[in-house]
Image (tube, rainbow, N blue to C red):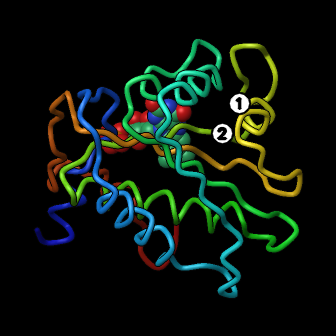
Amino acid sequence: MELLELMRTRRSVRSYKDDAVSEEDITKILQAGMLSASGKAIRPWDFIVVEDKVVLQKMAGCRAGSVKMLKEAACAIVVVGNGDASDVWIEDCSAVMSNMHLMAHALGLGSCWVQGRLRKADDRRDTEEYVRDILGYPENYKLLAILTVGVPNEEKAAYELDKLPVEKIHREKF
Ligand SMILES: Cc1cc2nc3c(=O)[nH]c(=O)nc-3n(C[C@H](O)[C@H](O)[C@H](O)COP(=O)(O)O)c2cc1C
C-alpha cells in the first residue's frame, strides 16, 4: 500500500482477538522502531517485549481505571528512554512509537499507544514506577509509552484527505 494510504487508514485499535501475533511480525515492528530518526543518532531507547499473559494482566493496572487493551493484547512493546544519554529522548522515543504503530498497521495488526509519562496507575503510583516494578528497567531509563499489539477485533473508519484540518497550515508566517 502506498505510504499516504497507509497513514490515512491507520487508527488506534483498542480491541483485539485472542489470536497470537507471529514472532516475524513482532520483529518487523521492532525493526521499524529501530529504523527511526534519532537526535545525533544516539538512539537512547530500549524495548521490552511482553507476551506473557499474566504479566500483561498486571501491566493493565498501569493506568487509573486500568487499560483494557493490555488485557486483550497478544503483545506489548514497552519503550523506555535513557534521559542521561540524550536530551531529546522523548522525541526519539515518540518517533519510535509512531513508526512501530504504523508498521503494525502495515502488517494488518491493530495497535494503540498507551501513555506512560505523566500518568498515574490504578494504585496512584506513577505509571512509570508501576511498570518499572514489573519489568525492572533501571532508574535512569524513563517510561515513554507502551504499544499494545494484536489482531484487530474492531473496524474503524479511515480518515478522508479532504477533511484534514488544513486551516492549521500556515505559510511563510503564522
Ligand atoms: C502521545 C499520545 C498518547 C496517547 N495515549 C493514549 C492512551 O494512553 N490511551 C489510549 O487509548 N490512546 C492513547 N493515544 C491514542 C490517541 O487517543 C489516538 O491517536 C487519538 O484518539 C486519534 O485516534 P487515531 O489514532 O485512531 O487516529 C495516544 C496517542 C498519542 C500520540
The quadrant holding residue 106 is bottom left
Which residue position holds label 1?
119
Residue 45, x across and y down, in percent: 67, 66
Helix, strand, or loop for circle 2?
Answer: loop
Residue beneath the point at 52% across and 64% down: 96
Residue 7, x across and y down, in percent: 25, 59
Residue beneath the point at 19% across and 46% down: 159
**Dot 1 and dot 2 residues touching (CB under 8 Å):** yes
- In the image, residue 155 above or below residue 4: above
Which residue position holds label 2?
116
- State how far apart marks 1 and 2 are (Cα): 6 Å
Q: Is disc 1's CB within 8 Å of ligand 1?
A: yes
- In the image, residue 124 above or below residue 69: above
Question: Could you tell me the amino acid type at mark 1?
Answer: Arg
Q: Is disc 2's CB within 8 Å of ligand 1?
A: no
Crowd rating for badge 1 (residues with CA inside 10 Å; few <14, some 14–19, many 20+): some
Name, please, the residue furthest toward the left.
1
The answer to whether residue 71 is seen in the rendering is yes
Side of 70 relative to 63 (left or right): left
Crowd rating for badge 2 (residues with CA inside 10 Å; few <14, some 14–19, many 20+): many
The answer to whether residue 102 is seen in the rendering is no
Residue 115, x across and y down, in percent: 59, 38
Side of 150 relative to 156 (left or right): right
Name, please, the residue furthest toward the bottom.
40
